[in-house]
Amino acid sequence: MQDGRRLCPVCRSSRLIMKYEAKYVYSYVIDEDKPGLKNETEFLPFLYDRREQVEADQYIECSSCGARLPVFYSQVNDGFDFKMTKGSISARDETPGATGDIPADRKY
């Protein structure tokens, strides 16, 4: 019987962290007072006029061995969806010595 814990395929550890890295470019219109139409008395970087995401990386990282496993996940109403490379993470089975692969597309 599976207990729902996921294992690293490299070291078999269950210490996994889901990560999302993103790089953004913030733009500020140059006007007569401070850069940015929303900045009037002082420049505050979070008051940008435009934000554009230029890079993104989603992965699961093992805290034990540092392995990075490619994954795509998105938010849904009752949780989130994983889209994984088939066999990138396995689920622990209570049967001694047995493991099973998580399906490539599964909602958690």
Image (tube, helix red, strand yellow):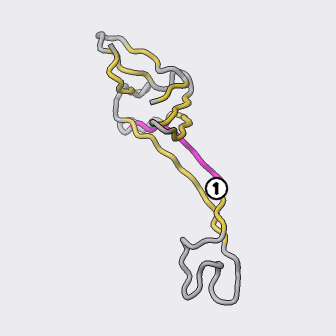
Name the residue nearer the viewer: 53 or 39: 39
Number of residue marks: 1
What residue is drawn where x is 46% and y is 18%?
101
Task: Give the side of residue 60 with respect to residue 49, left or right.
Answer: left
- Tell whether position 92 is magenta: no
* Mark 1 nearby-residue class (10 Å; few <14, some 14–19, many ≥20): few
Give the x, y percent position of residue 42: 54, 86
Indicate the quadrant containing the C terminus: top left, top right, bottom left or bottom right.
Answer: top left
42 versus 2 height, above or below? below
Task: Give the side of residue 53 with respect to residue 13, left or right.
Answer: right
38 versus 33 height, above or below? above
39 versus 69 height, above or below? below
Place residue 38 in its image quadrant: bottom right
Name the residue nearer the viewer: 5 or 36: 36
Give the x, y percent position of residue 85: 56, 27
Circle 1 is placed at which residue position?
Answer: 53
- Tell whether position 61 is magenta: yes
What residue is drawn where x is 29% and y is 14%?
94
60 versus 39 height, above or below? above
Residue type, label 1: Gln
Give the x, y percent position of residue 63: 37, 39
Task: Give the side of residue 92 with respect to residue 73, left or right.
Answer: left
Place residue 8 in its image quadrant: top left
Q: Which residues are magenta?
A: 55-62
Indicate the quadrant containing the N terminus: top left, top right, bottom left or bottom right.
Answer: top left
Give the x, y percent position of residue 61: 44, 38
What residue is drawn where x is 53% and y is 37%?
73
What predominant SS class does the magenta segment belong to? strand
Q: Give the structural element (helix, strand or loop) at label 1.
A: strand
